[in-house]
Image (spheres, rainbow, N blue to C red):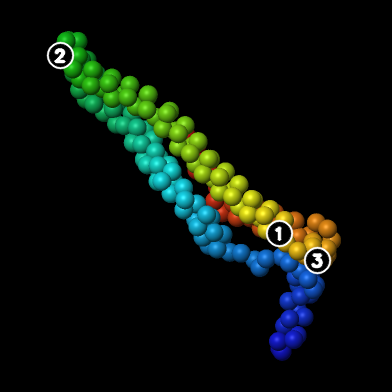
């Protein structure tokens, strides 16, 4: 196949001459573009990951607290008739840990979710502003070729496709 026939095949597949659609982007290229744009928010992104670890820690801490409750409180109280005064230090420690987890985890979940949404919204806004500034700076013949909405539709589709491989982290 000659290069001329390859060019004709390529233009017939892409919609003819003057088609301004970008080439198909792979998921890795789109993720790379997102990461490049989000570098200025890296401290917030690190905080989102750390808050995820905090949320996981407190979720598993509450599950772990069942074992000392059973082994150190409920079983001794039911089998040997241990009094409340002997169990009071263990109950205080377990209650303190449970109280801290109940207070800290909702705050960490909210802060993690809010920060993740804020970073993604900021990156999305920056991409849309860049697309709009490029469209406004484009020469008039670019807007006149093809139908009136082709350039705008291609630009908006390209910027929206950027966010498809990066869904938000699930909320707990």
Q: Position of residue 18 (x, y in %)?
A: 78, 71
- Give neighbour class at mark 3: few <14, some 14-19, many 20+ (Cα, 10 Å): few
* Number of callouts: 3
Question: Which residue, given by chain and number where applicable, does mark 2 sit on?
Answer: 86
Camera-nearest residue between 121 and 100: 121
Q: At 44% from the left edge and 46% from the top edge, which residue is drawn?
A: 45
Q: At 64% from the left edge and 50% from the top edge, which residue is drawn?
A: 129
Vertical relation: 84 (above or below) 110: above
Q: At 47% from the left edge and 50% from the top edge, which residue is drawn?
A: 40
Marks 1/3 in contact by CB < 8 Å: the verdict is: no
- Give neighbour class at mark 2: few <14, some 14-19, many 20+ (Cα, 10 Å): few
Foreground: disc 1 or disc 2 = 1
Vertical relation: 1 (above or below) 10: below
Q: Position of residue 94 (x, y in %)?
A: 26, 22
Q: Quadrant of residue 154?
A: bottom right
Question: Which residue, given by chain and number where applicable, does mark 1 sit on?
Answer: 137
Q: Position of residue 36 (x, y in %)?
A: 50, 57
Label 1, label 3: how many angstroms apart (C-alpha)? 12 Å
Camera-nearest residue between 59 and 80: 59
């Amino acid at each position: 196949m000659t290069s001329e026939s390859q060019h004709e095949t390529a233009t017939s597949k892409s919609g003819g001459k003057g088609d301004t659609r970008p080439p198909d982007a792979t998921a890795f290229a789109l993720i790379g573009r997102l990461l490049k744009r989000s570098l200025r928010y890296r401290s917030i992104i690190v905080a989102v990951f750390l808050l995820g670890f905090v949320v996981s820690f407190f979720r598993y801490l509450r599950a772990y607290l069942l074992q000392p409750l059973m082994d150190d409180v409920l079983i001794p109280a039911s089998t040997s008739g241990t009094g409340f005064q002997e169990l009071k230090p263990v109950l205080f420690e377990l209650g303190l840990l449970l109280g801290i987890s109940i207070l800290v985890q909702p705050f960490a979940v909210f802060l993690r979710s809010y920060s993740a949404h804020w970073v993604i919204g900021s990156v999305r806004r920056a991409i849309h502003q860049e697309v709009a500034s490029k469209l406004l700076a484009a020469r008039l013949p670019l807007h006149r070729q093809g139908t009136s909405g082709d350039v705008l539709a291609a630009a908006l589709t390209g910027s929206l496709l950027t966010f498809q491989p990066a869904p938000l982290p699930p909320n707990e």
